[in-house]
């Protein structure tokens, strides 16, 4: 997955992502003491606007946070998802995973497949509320209980003190059509909402019918 497939711009990866914190002291405590990330740059912005802090994510990338003096409070389900990611919650309440247009829904840290289970347990040991491990595959539910050949990424989700959904993710394989991977879905537009709502209703009927068998 290291191959550069962009013929227009030669991106070298992620430089930084900037999120917004309600309490920078609390944010620093979580990202340094719980996740072990080093605070590498801190800025008091001019004119009393607030602060801008950068945490090292490795490989030259940073996770950055603003603290704004006049920022509005978080609105769950608008600013970011109102719940941590969990298949059981998602199937019963798809709105639990949504956030508004232009929002940052969640951010995933790339970890080694060999370290994934160890890191999952380490989060639990640190008292972090985590989702079940999700083995994302190409089945109807797109989640497998086991790590099968068509699982393309493994994930665990959790939230920071501001409710920002974070993920530890590890790639399992290259994308390949033989495993059902596709890149030819027609991009949705606002006009497609009713179509997707009908798809959702049919999916829920199918799941209910299977559960009743």
Image: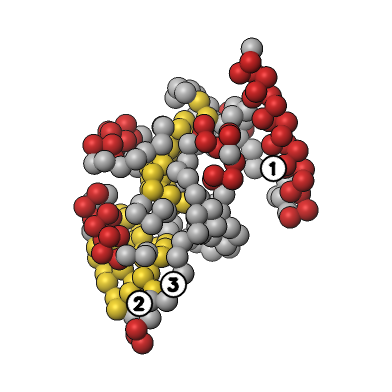
Q: Residue at x 28, y 33 (%)?
A: 121
Mark 2 or 1: in front is 2
Where residue 1 sits: x, y (%)? Answer: 46, 44
Where residue 104 sits: x, y (%)? Answer: 50, 57
Q: Residue at x 46, y 69 (%)?
A: 72
Indicate the quadrant where residue 71 lies: bottom left
Where residue 143 sits: x, y (%)? Answer: 52, 30
Secondary structure of residue under mark 3: loop
Image check: 190 left or right of 146? right
Spatial separation of the CA atoms under disc 3 and disc 2: 9 Å
Q: Which residue is mark 3?
A: 71
Q: Which residue is mark 2?
A: 50
N-terminal-most mark, 2 or 1: 2
Packing grade of label 3 (10 A; few <14, some 14-19, many >=20) is few
N-terminal-most mark, 3 or 2: 2
Q: Residue at x 43, y 49 (%)?
A: 165
Q: 96 and 177: which one is in front?
A: 96
Image check: 183 left or right of 134? right
Secondary structure of residue under mark 1: loop
N-terminal-most mark, 3 or 1: 3
Q: 11 and 80: which one is in front?
A: 80
- Whether residue 152 is visible: no
Mark 3 or 2: in front is 3
Q: Residue at x 30, y 60 (%)?
A: 27
Q: Dividing the image into 4 quarters, which one contains the C terminus?
A: top right
Q: Which residue is mark 1?
A: 184
Contact (Cβ within 8 Å) of mark 3 with mark 2:
yes
Image check: 167 left or right of 26? right
Spatial separation of the CA atoms under disc 2 and disc 1: 44 Å
Secondary structure of residue under mark 2: strand
Packing grade of label 1 (10 A; few <14, some 14-19, many >=20) is few
């Amino acid at each position: 997955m290291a191959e550069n497939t962009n013929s227009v711009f030669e991106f070298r990866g992620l430089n930084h992502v900037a999120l917004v914190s309600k309490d920078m002291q609390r944010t620093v405590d979580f990202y340094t003491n719980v996740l072990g990330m080093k605070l590498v740059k801190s800025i008091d912005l001019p004119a009393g606007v607030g602060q801008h802090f950068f945490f090292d994510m490795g490989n030259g990338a940073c996770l950055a946070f603003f603290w704004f003096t006049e920022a509005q409070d978080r609105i769950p389900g608008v600013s970011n998802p109102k719940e941590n990611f969990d298949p059981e919650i998602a199937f019963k309440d798809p709105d639990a995973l949504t956030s508004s247009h232009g929002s940052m829904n969640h951010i995933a840290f790339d970890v080694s497949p060999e370290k994934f289970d160890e890191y999952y347990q380490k989060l639990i040991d640190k008292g972090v509320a985590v989702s079940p491990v999700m083995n994302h595959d190409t089945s109807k539910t797109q989640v497998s209980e086991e790590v099968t050949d068509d699982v393309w990424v493994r994930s665990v989700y959790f939230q920071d003190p501001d409710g920002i959904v974070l993920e530890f993710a590890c790639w399992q394989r290259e994308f390949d059509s033989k495993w059902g991977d596709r890149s030819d879905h027609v991009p949705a537009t606002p006009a497609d909402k009713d179509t997707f709502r009908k798809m959702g209703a049919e999916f829920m009927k199918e799941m209910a019918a299977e559960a009743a068998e």
